[in-house]
Image: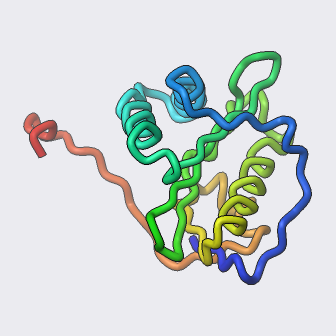
């Protein structure tokens, strides 16, 4: 899905609920949310985000919403140099904390940041759960992706 940022307005939101993380602990908190929502070990994603933040800190912004000191929602925004496109990723909220607006809060934060940094378009590979929320903000379906997991015994060498 794609959002034309020239055709959308920023929505007001309470930034005090959002923590931008950049160190290993904060990034680990962001990934803990992903693991709780989707199940499994996401250490590969932790390693990717940590290295990206260390080597190219301006290319990614990682956000966590904490409730009572516990991470409950996480998401990130990636930039690719001078590209007119930025990508929003990872937007997830643990089940017990859904319907509190945390996902929308981080969506609005990422839209506002992308606009402030001069990006023209945002992309998202939205799940069925996210599509209704991002559609309300103006995202349009332009393509569908299908994820696959290799069962090959040699998949680590690919």
Q: Specify whether 39 is left or right of 141.
A: left
Q: Count the marks.
A: 0
Residue at 45%, 66% in the rendered image: 81
In the rendered image, the vertical position of residue 154 relative to residue 69, given as above or below: below
The chosen color scheme is rainbow
Residue at 78%, 31% in the rendered image: 97
Q: Residue 4 appears in which quarter of the rendering?
A: bottom right
Q: Specify whether 152 is left or right of 68.
A: left
Name the outermost residue toward the top.
Answer: 69
Image coords of residue 3 (percent x, y): 65, 74
Image coords of residue 41 (percent x, y): 41, 25
Q: Specify whether 156 is left or right of 124.
A: left
Image coords of residue 91 (percent x, y): 63, 46
Which one is in front, 107 or 98?
Answer: 107
Which one is in front, 102 or 63?
Answer: 63
In the rendered image, the vertical position of residue 123 relative to residue 152, given as above or below: below
């Amino acid at each position: 899905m794609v959002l034309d940022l020239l055709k959308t307005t920023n929505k007001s939101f309470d930034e005090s609920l959002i923590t931008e993380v950049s160190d290993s602990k904060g990034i680990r908190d962001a990934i803990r949310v992903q693991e709780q929502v989707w199940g499994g070990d996401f250490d590969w994603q932790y390693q990717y985000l940590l290295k990206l933040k260390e080597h190219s800190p301006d290319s990614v912004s990682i956000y966590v919403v904490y409730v009572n000191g516990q991470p409950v929602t996480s998401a990130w925004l990636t930039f690719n140099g001078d590209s007119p496109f930025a990508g929003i990723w990872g937007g997830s909220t643990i089940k017990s904390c859904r319907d509190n607006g945390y996902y929308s809060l981080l969506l609005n934060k990422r839209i506002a940041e992308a606009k402030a940094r001069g990006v023209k378009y945002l992309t998202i590979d939205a799940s069925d759960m996210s599509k209704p929320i991002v559609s309300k903000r103006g995202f349009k379906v332009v393509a569908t992706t299908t994820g696959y997991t290799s069962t090959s015994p040699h998949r680590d060498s690919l």
